[in-house]
Amino acid sequence: MTSERDIERLLDRWFTERPTQVADRVIDDVAARIVRQPQRAAWRLRPWRFPSMSTPIKLVAVGAALLVVILGGAVFIGGGSGPVLPAPTATPSPTPVASASPSITPSTGAGFPDWYSPDEPPAGAGILAAGSNATQSFSPAFTFTVPDGWVGDGTGVFSLFQDSPVNKAEFGRSGALANGILMGPHESPYFFCEAMENNRGSTAAEMTAALMATEGIETTAVVDVTIGGLTGKQFDVRIDPDWTGSCPAGPDDPPRDIKDERVRGFLLDVPDRGVIVIFVGSLHSADHEAFLAEAMPIVESFQFDLSN
Amino acid sequence: MDHDLVRAAQRGDQAAFIDLIRPRSDRLFAIALQILRDIDRAEDALQDALVIAWRDLRGLRDPDRLDAWLRRLLVNICIREASRERRRAVNLRMLPVDGPAAADDLLSIADRDQLERGFRRLPPDQRAILVLHHFLGYASTEIAETLGIPPATARSRLYHAHRAMRAALEADARLSIVGGRSA
């Protein structure tokens, strides 16, 4: 019974399939559980170990680190991100920067950098024209101003990132972006590790307090901020260098050094609709200051339209 | 049809997701059962895998990959669950996974018992590899894809899993003789 070939034959017979039926209650329980389980936005997912996928996955936004879960956010805000369109000329430029002749031609698929593979991008997403742009369906709608070389994308969340060598290299390596701006509605975002953070709250202040109380998370002093007409909290956040815990990875999560990641976070109250989060983040701390210098003028150019 | 269900489920349609998984659930359950050898744990692993599948479904770009993707999720969860089981060293109830032997079955009850004991001695990843190869009929490339390892590593691990199974059976046979049982 123990020769090599015998073993294989025995196992072939032993594993011969017999009818096996799962109890109905198992699937019924799954149906009950998924009611409480929000789906993750596509950008948060990185099935990069799937050999059949010829292109590295999609929109991943600023790496796993910035992979903020927009858990159930649509309930509060009533919609995800949407296509990016140049702002209409009728919109007065709120700042001198916006005088960089906003485009009036709706983008119908401006294309993406050749190194980047979006996941079913909404119409209009892609490389942005320099100047003033507007989201088409992000709620609340907003306008923003970008220089040359920026890209907009998002399904479920909205992201802005540069067509840059560092993003290209990181995307080729891990399927994530090295630096980027992400935003979306949420009721329980996390900044570095879903398993260790429970930043729940119904206001920006409550969520910020929860974040600051999280073991292993280190934040700068929180300041009050107004972005595009919305008020909230701003802070810089990272993993405490002395933290000795670990972040359990999911089956699909690639290994990453969360201690090297840096995020500037904004939590903004949207009256009667909940909170949106904006992340300006870098996978690698060495990139962060330079990226902040380029990204913050864009964030500061946001103008939210609360009438929709 | 499945493409439509996948797309609908990716847009958040829970009923579509259940319609998608229900016809696949018996097969998936069988895989979990073969690896874990325990009905309760197999049910738990299947449920966990399906909930994760729901959570991450938007990341599935190619609906044709759904079955492979589900199996990969499930096998990884089973390996994790089997590792916990080994750490806890609990006494699991014997699994009636094969049911009563059919008339044309060439394996005796004693062989089955011996295989069961031998299989349970294996590390979880070796159990999974044997199930993928002998139960699902996977070649090393498919095993590699499922476990996220290079094909050469899959071949090597399969070889070692066979050797480990052989050693486990021989050890069981020796114990049987010492204990007065006949194998």
Image: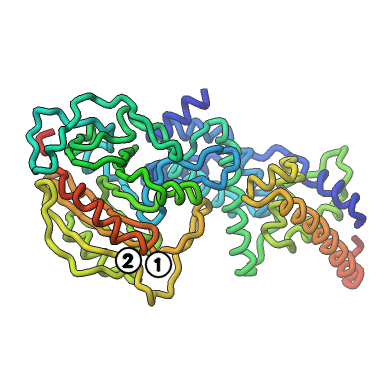
Q: Residue at x 14, y 55 (%)?
A: A232
Residue matched to label 1: A259
Image vertical order of residue A228 relative to residue A110, above or below: below
Task: State the residue lying farthest toward the top.
Answer: B1
Q: How is the image coloured?
A: rainbow
- Give the chain letter at badge 2: A
Residue B40 at least partly seen: no
Residues B23 and B71: in front is B71
- Look at label 1 and name its amino acid: Lys
Circle 2 sits in a helix, a strand or a loop, which is it?
strand
Residues B109 and B14: in front is B14
The quarter of the picture where residue A306 lies is top left
Q: Percent position (x, y) of residue A175?
A: 47, 47
Q: Which mark is residue B102?
A: none
Residue matched to label 2: A238
The quarter of the picture where residue A263 lies is bottom left
The residues tagged by marks 1 and 2 sit, at their Cα atoms, a distance apart of 7 Å
Circle 1 sits in a helix, a strand or a loop, which is it?
helix
Q: Residues within 10 Å of mark 1 (few under 14, many from 20)?
A: some
The quarter of the picture where residue A291 lies is bottom left
Q: Residue at x 71, y 41 (%)?
A: B136
Residue A155 at least partly seen: yes
Q: Percent position (x, y) of residue A233?
A: 16, 59
